[in-house]
Amino acid sequence: MATIELFNTLSGKVEALAPVGAPELRMYCCGPTVYDYGHIGNFRTFLHVDVLRRFVRQQGIDTKHVMNVTDVDDKIIRNAAAAGVSIAEYTAKYERAFFEDLDALGIQKSEHVAHATSCIPEMVGLIEKLASKDIAYQAEDGSWYFRIARFPEYGKLSKKDFDGIEDGARVDVDEYEKDAARDFALWKAAKPGEQHWDTPLGSGRPGWHIECSAMATKFLGDSFDLHAGGEDLMFPHHENEIAQSESASGKTFARHWMHVRFLLVEGKKMSKSEGNFYTLRDLLLRGYRASAIRFLLISVPYRHQMNFTFESLAESTNAIERLRTFHQRMLKGGFADGLDADVAAATAKAERGYTASLANDLNTAEARAAIFDLVRTANSAADAGTLHAGNVVEILRVLDLFDGVFAVLEDRDAALTRAALAWAEAEGRLGEAAPELLNNLSLGDEEIDALVAERTQAKKTRNFARADAIRNDLLAKGILIEDSKDGVRWKRK
């Protein structure tokens, strides 16, 4: 079992990541605020957390992973009111879409999913504990605020200097200027027409920051192993989580903090005004594969800023094709008994490189490179006739190890794209789908199999005109036919 080392934002150092006080790694990841569809920047964070979780479990450590769903906040209340529906009705659609997108990207579900609206009593209890210490106070309008001047370590995560904090200066919105040090809202007094909860704190709803503290401690205790999220959450959200949680318990909230860097798109910050804002569904409707999107978004280590380009997405598609083709070649067998020493050494080296790279602060780029080195070596040996059955057993084992984390060998792409098209049709957005995509998926797998079989029979009876016509018709629909000594294969572009 490898020792996993991960950069800790709190200490500013790469440190060993291991469970403390429990057999499993207790980890919390800030989940979605379900007010809209998730974009690829959001999913880069969830993908890297998935890579970590998969690798931790692969190294023999169980996980107790909690992800929250924020189903009440300023944006949700505003959008639900504009749509004329309840908060629950508004968020249900986007929560369902979020989990569908997680599945499409191969992200495993956490052991616990915590909804903010299901944890109101825990939030109220936490605020009451802070109030008993005079760290939470009630304002004139009935809202409750956290007095950050009472937490001298405020800023220790983001490394911001907040000397001269003005005691009593408040901010009541959930998200605010990145350098503002103000008393933040724990509980917001009810406003006319807003959904609210009647509690000992008064009638109102929770602030955003208190939600995560309450949900994390409910499932993981006052102190746990790892807290993860995007770097945009470091301040103020995670800083506020630490302040309120540690003020209430007197214990270290999370020992290790993991933050995933921002995503650029074609060299620019992703934004709707730039026209480079993409959800997963946008990309699927353009004809890109879910597996290629996953592979690309985890190709750059999490602490490096990633530049997402459509050229790199095409390269990711080709890389997955190479892996899948190689995997099928190994599975088909037909290799002579025995073991080639050079290939065996290359296989062992690839396994060591893969494990060491991921154990070293989740270096996904080097882990990938180790496996592709093995693909090149084994393909060359197979072409030269020096690859043996004993080698293939070990190669398949290493590929299985790799896929246990990277999760791209299983081909679900056509089914996932069809699901995206069905969603677009239901939402009246089918016009956004690429025409060639609609053409490509106009034939089902069984229909293609039948046409390929008909073409094979036509060739046997020397009806080459019909065989060529079938091939050309399939090519026009984006279906490629490959004739090889191992038989006929087809694949979608």
Image (cartoon, rainbow, N blue to C red):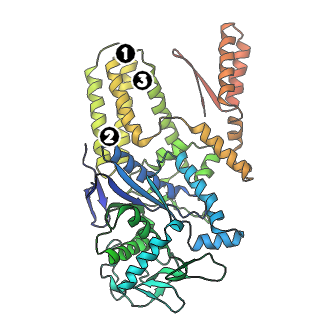
Residue 275 seen in the current view: no
Element type where label 2 sits in the image: helix
Asked if 30 appears above or below 493 in the picture, the reply is below
The quadrant of the image that shows the N terminus is top left
Find the residue positioned furthest to the top: 461
What mark, if any, has residue 385 been given in the picture?
Answer: 1
Left or right: 439 as drawn, with respect to 166? right
Labelled pair 2, 1 in contact (Cβ < 8 Å): no
Question: Distance of mark 3 from mark 1, alpha carbons?
Answer: 13 Å
Indicate the amino acid at tag 1. Gly
Measuring from the top left, give residue 370's x and y in whole percent: 34, 38
Find the residue positioned furthest to the bottom: 140
Indicate the amino acid at tag 2. Tyr
**Residue for badge 2:** 354
Element type where label 1 sits in the image: loop
Q: Residues within 10 Å of mark 3 (few under 14, many from 20)?
A: many
Which comes before the other along the chain, label 2 or label 3?
3
Indicate the amino acid at tag 3. Met
Question: Distance of mark 2 from mark 3, alpha carbons?
Answer: 19 Å
**Residue for badge 3:** 330
475 or 55, nearer to the observer: 55
Which comes before the other along the chain, label 2 or label 1?
2
Residue at 56 percent across and 66 percent down: it is: 71
Left or right: 42 as drawn, with respect to 392? right
Measuring from the top left, give residue 254's x and y in whole percent: 32, 65
Labelled pair 3, 1 in contact (Cβ < 8 Å): no
Residue 347: name its quadrant.
Answer: top left
Residue at 46 percent across and 47 percent down: it is: 108
Measuring from the top left, give residue 37's x and y in whole percent: 60, 58
Measuring from the top left, give residue 468's x and y in whole percent: 70, 18
Element type where label 3 sits in the image: helix
